[in-house]
Image: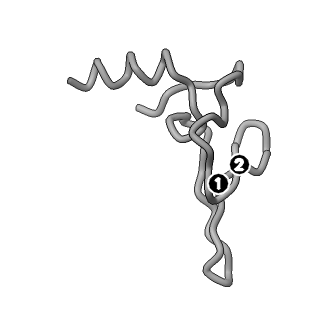
Amino acid sequence: MEQNIKEYREKHPRCKYCKYERLVMGITSYSYYRCELKDKYIGSLKSDWKGIFCKWFKPKE
């Protein structure tokens, strides 16, 4: 089962599946997602389409 998930994520790159995505917790309870590799803001309400063309995508383990 886990192999099927990994295969799916490799074929469908999205920021939410990427190992470089990190949740940043703000002081005033505002949180957002950030790409560690690119040092780029992703957003707190991520689109399912974010990251589909990213050449640096690596699926989370």
For residue 6, what is the image quadrant?
top left
Under circle 2, the secondary element is: strand
Residue under pointer 1? 33
Question: For the point 51% across and 22% down, which residue is it?
Answer: 12
Under circle 1, the secondary element is: strand
Tags 1 and 2 in contact by the CB under 8 Å rule? yes
**Horizontal and vertical percent for residue 16?**
53, 41
Which quarter of the rendering shows the C terminus? top left
- The correct choice, above or below, for 29 with respect to 16 in the image is below
**Horizontal and vertical percent for residue 11?**
49, 15
Which color mode does the image show?
one colour
Q: Residue furthest bottom?
A: 28
Q: What amino acid does circle 2 point to?
A: Ile
Viewer-side residue, 8 vs 37:
8
- Earlier residue among tags 1 and 2: 1
Q: What amino acid does circle 1 point to?
A: Tyr
What whole-number distance in Å separates the C-alpha atoms at marks 1 and 2?
Answer: 5 Å
Q: Residue furthest left?
A: 1
Viewer-side residue, 25 vs 11:
11
Task: Characterize the local packing of mark 1: few (<14), some (14-19) or many (20 or more) Cα atoms within 10 angstroms.
Answer: some
Question: For the point 62% across and 25% down, which residue is it?
Answer: 57
- The correct choice, above or below, for 18 with respect to 33 in the image is above
Question: For the point 29% across and 19% down, which residue is it?
Answer: 4
Residue under pointer 2? 42
